[in-house]
Image: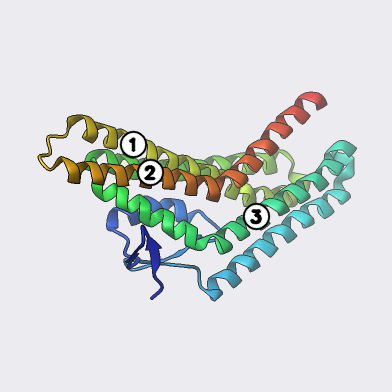
């Protein structure tokens, strides 16, 4: 069993039921797993998982290339700008899929450290009722994103039946929506823990002040570590998605 070292102590990679329930809807929607959770244990991706991830990545990239190739047969139904813009889509989305693979495979241990540190904070600062609502909203956000994406792509296919096969590739782009939701929900989790940390600090009636201060300071350090790890694991990918979306809006405005 592989061991991750946190705060200079060896910790068996045990994941509590609460954390597994929180991560379940987010991980189910990810095409490339960031780690492996079997039973109550979390472990880095195996060689088999990495092979599956790279196959999925290659299939997604091939599908995007096929979309652009397919558009060449429907140029009468598109403007030249749309056709040539599809090459930009291929480059962007292919880069995104490759980046997702790299983050999932090469940052797997950092993702595990993030999960274990989040769990450490959750054990100290937990509002049971609020956390249950948090898990429910995780499911709501993921399902809403999947259903909305499904409806939008299906609507586009129905409006343009004569090249619907090309538009079907749009179903594969839901990964980018899920990635933003994943990051957003982790940030919300951290926001809740910061509020609980602050409340405990302000309302504490501990008699062992030194011990209490030590625990609170260590927790504060863990909070900062979590933010740093979330930044390392998500910032580049999410920034790329937002940049592309803004570029799409600007291009649409110019085209109009």
In front here: 110 or 104? 110
| Element type where label 1 sits in the image | helix
The reply, left or right, for residue 253 in relation to residue 227 is right
- First in sequence: mark 1 vs mark 3: 3
The residue sitting at 29% across, 53% down in the picture is 18
Residue where numbered disc 3 is placed: 99
Distance between mark 1 and mark 3 Cα atoms: 30 Å
- First in sequence: mark 1 vs mark 2: 1
The reply, left or right, for residue 137 in relation to residue 76 is left
Q: Position of residue 125 (x, y in %)?
A: 25, 43
Foreground tag (2 vs 3): 2
- First in sequence: mark 2 vs mark 3: 3
Relative to 237, say whether 38 is above or below. below
The answer to whether marks 1 and 2 mark residues whose Cβ atoms lie closer than 8 Å is yes
- The circle on residue 223 is 2
Distance between mark 2 and mark 3 Cα atoms: 26 Å
| Element type where label 3 sits in the image | helix
Q: How crowded is mark 1: few (under 14 residues within 10 Å), some or many (20 or more)?
A: some
Residue where numbered disc 1 is placed: 194
Residue at the extreme left of the image, as rendered? 207
The answer to whether marks 2 and 3 mark residues whose Cβ atoms lie closer than 8 Å is no
In front here: 130 or 86? 130
The residue sitting at 43% across, 53% down in the picture is 114
Q: Residues within 10 Å of mark 2 (few under 14, many from 20)?
A: many
Distance between mark 1 and mark 2 Cα atoms: 8 Å
Q: Would you identify the image quadrant in which residue 194 lies?
A: top left
Q: Would you identify the image quadrant in which residue 248 lies?
A: top right
């Amino acid at each position: 069993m592989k061991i991750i070292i946190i705060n200079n102590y060896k910790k068996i990679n045990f994941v509590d039921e609460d954390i597994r329930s929180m991560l379940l809807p987010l991980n189910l929607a990810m095409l490339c797993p960031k780690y492996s959770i079997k039973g109550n244990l979390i472990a880095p991706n195996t060689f088999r998982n990495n092979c599956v991830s790279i196959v999925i990545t290659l299939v997604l990239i091939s599908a995007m290339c096929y979309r652009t190739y397919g558009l060449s047969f429907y140029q009468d139904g598109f403007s030249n700008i749309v056709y040539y813009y599809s090459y930009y889509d291929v480059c962007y989305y292919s880069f995104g899929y490759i980046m997702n693979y790299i983050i999932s495979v090469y940052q797997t241990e950092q993702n595990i450290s993030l999960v274990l540190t989040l769990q450490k904070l959750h054990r100290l600062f937990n509002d049971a009722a609020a956390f249950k609502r948090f898990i429910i909203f995780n499911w709501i956000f993921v399902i809403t994103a999947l259903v909305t994406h499904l409806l939008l792509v299906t609507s586009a296919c129905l409006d343009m039946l004569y090249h619907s096969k090309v538009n079907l590739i749009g179903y594969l782009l839901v990964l980018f929506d899920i990635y933003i939701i994943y990051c957003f929900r982790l940030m919300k989790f951290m926001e809740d823990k910061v509020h609980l940390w602050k409340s405990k600090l302000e309302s504490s009636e501990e008699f062992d002040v030194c011990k209490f201060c030590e625990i609170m300071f260590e927790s504060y350090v863990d909070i900062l570590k979590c933010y740093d790890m979330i930044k390392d694991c998500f910032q580049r990918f999410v920034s790329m998605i937002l940049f592309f979306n803004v570029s799409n809006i600007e291009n649409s405005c110019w085209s109009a």
